[in-house]
């Protein structure tokens, strides 16, 4: 067809994207440096371009136009004209059909073809050269979406109080692919996650909030093509407004409208069961990679606005993510894209919050990460987003990228200090062979007050609650809980990178044999360490997060980077599930719910207290905290209603604990033993003065305060 195009009727500059209205479709696209923007219509096959229509503008950087007669289901792409001047940061190339970043429905498949790149492969000038070949036939297309039918799933959102939240990180597909109790046609899908069988497991387990690995439209990285592997985790987002069809049931996967409906139905069903849905979002980088990557959307729309470029060499991308590029959220229009996407997923799709991948990128300025960055201010002021959880992964790959404790306001943060302390304390060694002492364990057990309590340090968010600390033992990128007590080194050969990928030196320990063993002593040591870690996680102050499968002993065979394992390595091994471990984990969450002292939403002061004791019975002093030859200790939590004792013994031998004075209102002998993580000691009365705590075990005792004795 002719490259000429027809000027569209005047349109509205908002909302951005394609909007059905008044018997047609309104298109609005941001590009500050373009000289011309065209909407290209395609037939239903996506292979034949039917017509081109020029947008009007720009006005404040926005190009817009109205197309009468257009309707939902219309396939389209964008062609953007402008300077091709890589050294000035511009890579406009009208030969490349671009995906609308506001696309709510996406069709086609990205295949990483040579013509998807803006430069000719093998050219001596590399990515400075220009490849004008038209890739319209094979490029991904947006499809005009009809307004979503029915009420938003927000109408029945549970909105759990922060102190009651127990997070459960889970991959939509991996959770159900091997679950024998789910219909085979649904396994691996949004529908399966909301099936009554799945919901029954979440409710038995006592989790309140699912934290889904990425569910936005994602594509595979170029290095995976031809390997038989794929980006299973999904941290390569291209469509910020579209649910990933790969996670939908097979019956609807081909239809983006039906995929969105299945996602919304999932959220609604989980809400009806009292379960919240948080989604992992990737606004820090895109699949376009570095300057050698393909031109799919933002690069061709306006690279200089959407991405951070290297100071002094605008032909190269700034890489603060270790993924090739960095989204420039400091730019107001880019911040708008992120905020519009967040509002869409809350208002239209019904989700209850977000976990921001490599979150410091969102607050980076020319001076580094700033907790007062404009994006954070806008996020905190938005009335819709004020209703939902905000969770930061508080590090990126740039300079000063580690920002734990420096996020503002209501943000909760993944606390890797808790992970390393809890693992190292029960394994008997910390990172690089160091020892995790009693002081480090106590700090992390008490919600890392040295990080989050504003009275102990300056941080970017003003007053922070103990609940800001998201405590975890394992997550998607690393060993499972089973594997970290069964291996002393990573086993990632299946990833095709000669075991070079994944974190070297990740804290783990095999207790004497690498991998599976029949040795009863080693098996017992592993089991006790695993249960003690789970008890530490779910009885500590802060907000706990379980990694799916850890409640029943799921293994990835020692692979600590299963990002490309869309197979039995990455899927939960339900046929081998340990039901007794599920029951133990459920008991821990029940204890957490039953005893508010275990989920305090304020730092311990005044009538509520947290005190630490040596196993000899005296309160810990400076000498005791420094004693490297002693590892066991006792925590006593108290308020006006009850007192709790946690007796902690990480050593390989039993330890006799003398109980601290119970104070006015009763004796420990009048109380109850609520838990022995080893299973050796049955629940019942506490000892009068002392308790023998088994090896590698945590015990919980309770005493009811007798108010009449205090009068």
Image (tube, rainbow, N blue to C red):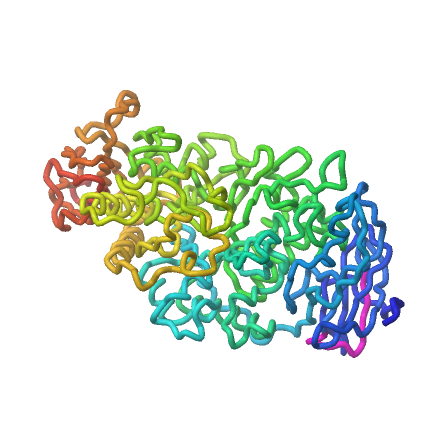
**Residue lying at 36% horizontally and 67% vertically, measured from the top left:** 179
Asked where in the image residue 324 lies, by quadrant, the reply is top right
Residue 431: where, in percent of width, then height?
A: 39, 33
Residues 570 and 580: in front is 570
- Let me know if residue 233 appears in the view: yes
Number of numbered callouts drawn: 0
Write the start and end of the magenta stretch as one range.
Answer: 63-74
Residue 374: where, in percent of width, then height?
A: 66, 44
**Residue lying at 49% horizontally and 42% vertically, measured from the top left:** 500
Residue 317: where, in percent of width, then height?
A: 70, 42
Q: Is residue 302 magenta?
A: no
**Residue lying at 53% horizontally and 44% vertically, measured from the top left:** 409
Please identify the quadrant where the C terminus is shown: top left
Q: Is residue 72 magenta?
A: yes
- Let me know if residue 638 appears in the view: no
**Left or right position of 373 against 419:** right
592 up-or-down from 23: above or below: above
In the displayed image of the protein, which residue is found farthest to the top? 623
Please identify the quadrant where the N terminus is shown: bottom right
Residues 303 and 584: in front is 303
Residue 370: where, in percent of width, then height?
A: 61, 37
**Left or right position of 357 against 9:** left
**Left or right position of 194 against 710:** right
């Amino acid at each position: 067809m002719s490259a000429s195009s027809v000027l569209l009727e005047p349109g509205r500059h908002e909302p951005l994207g394609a909007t059905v209205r008044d018997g047609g479709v309104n298109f609005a696209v941001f590009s500050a440096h373009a000289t011309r923007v065209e909407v290209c219509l395609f037939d239903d096959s996506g292979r034949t371009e039917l017509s081109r229509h020029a947008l009007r503008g720009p006005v404040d950087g926005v190009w817009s136009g109205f197309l009468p007669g257009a309707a939902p289901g219309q396939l389209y792409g964008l062609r953007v004209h402008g300077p091709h001047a890589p050294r000035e940061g511009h890579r406009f190339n009208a030969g490349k059909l671009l995906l609308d970043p506001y696309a709510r429905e996406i069709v086609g498949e990205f295949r990483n073809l040579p013509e998807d790149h803006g430069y000719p492969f093998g050219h001596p000038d590399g990515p400075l050269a220009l490849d004008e070949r038209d890739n319209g036939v094979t490029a991904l297309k947006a499809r005009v979406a009809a307004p979503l039918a029915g009420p938003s799933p927000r109408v029945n959102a549970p909105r759990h109080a922060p102190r009651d939240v127990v997070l459960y990180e889970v991959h939509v597909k991996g959770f159900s692919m091997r679950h024998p109790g789910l219909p085979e046609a649904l396994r691996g899908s949004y529908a399966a996650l909301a099936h009554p069988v799945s919901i029954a497991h979440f409710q038995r387990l006592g989790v309140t909030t699912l934290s889904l690995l990425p569910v936005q439209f994602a594509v595979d990285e170029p290095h995976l093509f031809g390997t038989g592997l794929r980006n299973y985790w999904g941290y390569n987002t291209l469509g910020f407004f579209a649910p990933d069809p790969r996670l939908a049931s097979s019956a609807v996967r081909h239809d983006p409208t039906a995929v969105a409906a299945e996602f919304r139905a999932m959220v609604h069903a989980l809400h009806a069961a009292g379960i919240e849905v948080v989604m992992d979002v990737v606004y820090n980088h895109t699949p376009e990679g570095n300057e050698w990557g393909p031109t799919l959307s933002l690069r061709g729309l306006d690279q200089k606005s959407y991405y951070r470029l290297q100071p002094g060499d605008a032909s190269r991308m700034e890489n603060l993510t270790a993924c090739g590029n960095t989204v420039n959220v400091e730019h107001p229009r880019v911040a708008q894209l992120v905020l519009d996407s967040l509002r869409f997923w809350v208002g239209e799709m019904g989700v209850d919050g977000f976990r921001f991948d490599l979150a410091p990128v969102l607050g980076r300025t020319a001076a580094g990460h700033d907790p007062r960055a404009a994006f954070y201010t806008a996020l905190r002021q938005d009335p819709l987003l004020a209703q939902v959880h905000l969770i930061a992964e508080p590090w990126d790959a740039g300079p000063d990228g580690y920002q734990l404790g420096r996020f503002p306001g209501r943000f909760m943060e993944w606390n890797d200090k808790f992970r390393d302390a809890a693992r190292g304390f029960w394994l008997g060694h910390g990172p690089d062979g160091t020892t995790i002492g009693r002081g480090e364990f106590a700090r992390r057990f008490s919600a890392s007050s040295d990080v989050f309590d504003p009275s102990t340090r300056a941080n970017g968010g003003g007053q922070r609650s103990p609940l800001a600390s998201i405590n975890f033992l394992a997550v998607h990128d690393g060993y499972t809980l089973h594997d970290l007590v069964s291996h002393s080194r990573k086993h990632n050969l299946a990833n095709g990178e000669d075991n070079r990928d994944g974190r070297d030196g990740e804290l783990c320990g095999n207790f004497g044999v690498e991998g599976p063993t029949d040795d009863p002593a080693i098996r017992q040591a592993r089991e006790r360490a695993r249960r003690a870690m789970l008890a530490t996680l779910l009885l500590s102050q802060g907000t706990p997060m379980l990694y799916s499968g850890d409640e029943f002993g799921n293994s990835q065979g020692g692979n600590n980077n299963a990002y490309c394992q869309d197979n039995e390595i990455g899927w939960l091994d339900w046929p081998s599930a340990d039901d007794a471990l599920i029951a133990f984990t459920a008991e821990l969450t029940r204890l957490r719910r039953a005893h508010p002292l275990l989920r305090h939403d304020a730092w311990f002061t005044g009538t509520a207290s947290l005190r630490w004791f040596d196993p000899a019975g005296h309160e810990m002093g400076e000498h005791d905290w420094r004693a490297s030859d002693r590892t066991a200790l006792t925590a006593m939590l108290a308020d006006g209603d009850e007192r709790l004792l946690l007796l902690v013994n990480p050593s390989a031998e039993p330890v006799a604990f003398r109980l601290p004075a119970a104070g006015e209102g009763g004796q420990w002998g009048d109380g109850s033993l609520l838990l022995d993580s080893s299973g050796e000691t049955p629940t019942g009365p506490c000892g009068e003065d002392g308790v023998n705590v088994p090896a590698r075990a945590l015990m919980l005792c309770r005493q009811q305060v007798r108010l009449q004795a205090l009068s």
